[in-house]
Amino acid sequence: MTFIKRAATGLVLTCCFASNAFADNARQFSGVAAFYSRDYAGKTACGERYDPKKFTAAHRSLPFGTRLRVTDPRSLRSVVVVVNDRGPFTKGRVLDLSLAAAKALRMTDRGLMKVTAFVQ
């Protein structure tokens, strides 16, 4: 699904899916991640309906469609998620993960977890 928006300087293209924006410039960041509430049922910032069974994440500034490998440095478990939302809006957090991603990382009992994320 692609959205086209008209800007004063011409057409601006944004996309909810695959993006190679950082393919040539690998980036990494670390910090605290949280996950969406089990009761959340709404739309994400890119316009998709949130699906707790998909491996998605919210990040403040990465382009929608960016793929991230998110790793728990203690257990070395990792998942690949796609950025499709904005957030987290709580100071000190770097990602909000979908319920599926949180379960795969086994963080649902902890709530918060320090992670390392690599832009793929």
Image (cartoon, grey):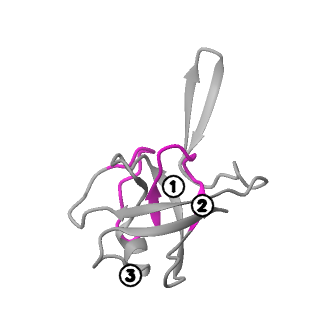
Q: Tell me the crowding category of disc 1: few under 14, some 14 to 19, or many 20 or more residues within 10 angstroms, Cα based.
A: many
Q: 98 above or below 41?
A: below
The answer to whether marks 3 and 1 mark residues whose Cβ atoms lie closer than 8 Å is: no
Point out which mark residue 67 bears: 2
Q: Is residue 11 left or right of residue 61?
A: right
Please identify the dominant SS of the magenta region: loop
Q: Nearer the viewer, residue 41 or 74?
A: 74
Highlighted range, magenta: 43-69
- Disc 3: which residue: 106
Whether the magenta-drawn stretch holds residue 24 is answered as no
Q: Nearer the viewer, residue 16 or 93?
A: 93
The residue located at (24%, 59%) in the rendering is 40
- Under mark 3, the amino acid is Arg
Residue 99 x/y as whole percent: 35, 70
- The label nearer to you, 3 versus 2, is 3
Q: How many marks?
A: 3
N-terminal label among 3 and 2: 2
Residue 23 x/y as whole percent: 74, 55
Point out which mark residue 83 bears: 1
The answer to whether marks 2 and 1 mark residues whose Cβ atoms lie closer than 8 Å is: yes
N-terminal label among 2 and 1: 2
The residue located at (43%, 46%) in the rendering is 86
Identify the secondary structure beneath mark 3.
loop
Residue 119 x/y as whole percent: 64, 59
Q: Tell me the crowding category of disc 3: few under 14, some 14 to 19, or many 20 or more residues within 10 angstroms, Cα based.
A: some
State the CA–CA distance, disc 2 to disc 1: 7 Å
- Under mark 1, the amino acid is Val
